[in-house]
Amino acid sequence: MLTHPRVRRRLHQLILILYALVMLGMAAMVIGPFLNDRTIEANPGRALATVRDVSTLRTTVDYTDEQGVLHTPAAGLLYPTGLGEGQRVWVLYDRGNPELVKVEGREWTLAVIPALSSAAVASVVAAGLWWAVGAAGRRAEPAGTRINPELGPDSPDRDVKEAQ
């Protein structure tokens, strides 16, 4: 299967596409928090919040805004690392959207290291897959066969036996 150059080329294209999508996801890991912080900083409110629940996916808090309205953001708290149930923390929220709330003093830059480490792992995996496809293709080629790069991929004379 990997003896055919078209199959190897398609596998390499697939690896590149998946790698590009992963890199896009890593960029979103940084751009999303940056935009959230920018939104909060444009119209900030400050409040003392109580941590109600800490789970794998989100940390839930209750806080009262400047108008005395109690909020429990459904999406949870941004940058919740190290918080425990019952803990009271100062939070900043967007007055225009009180569902957007983060721990005071924590910034989008906290997302840079996880994004870079994920990108590094993805790069190693993509490079390994790229190499594996190439190595498997080279092993699958019959001995003494070479591909003439001057001929097109559909040319019947593309595979030429080397002179013995």
Image (tube, helix red, strand yellow):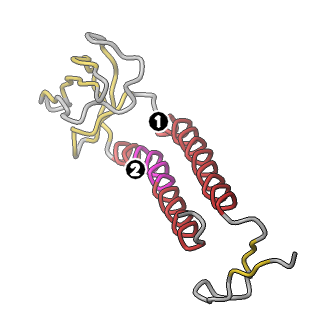
For residue 158, side relative to residue 114 (left or right): right
Residue depicted at 82% across the width and 77% down the height: 162
Magenta includes 31? yes
Q: Mark 1 points at which residue?
A: 107
Q: Mark 2 points at which residue?
A: 35
> Magenta stretch?
22-34
- The number of discs equals 2
The overriding secondary structure of the stretch rendered in magenta is helix
Q: Looking at the picture, does residue 56 appear above or below residue 74?
A: above
Mark 1 or mark 2, which is nearer the start of the sequence? 2
The amino acid type of the residue labelled 2 equals Leu
Residue 102 drawn at (x, y percent): 34, 32
Of 95 and 113, the residue lying toward us: 113
Quadrant in which the C terminus appears = bottom right
Residue depicted at 45% across the width and 30% down the height: 106
Of 39 and 32, the residue lying toward us: 32
The residue tagged with tag 1: helix, strand or loop? loop
For residue 145, side relative to residue 119 (left or right): right
User: Label 1 neighbourhood size at 10 Å, few (<14), some (14-19), many (20+)?
Assistant: some
Outermost residue on the left side: it is 69
Outermost residue on the right side: it is 164
Of 3 and 63, the residue lying toward us: 3
The amino acid type of the residue labelled 1 equals Glu
Quadrant housing residue 29? top left
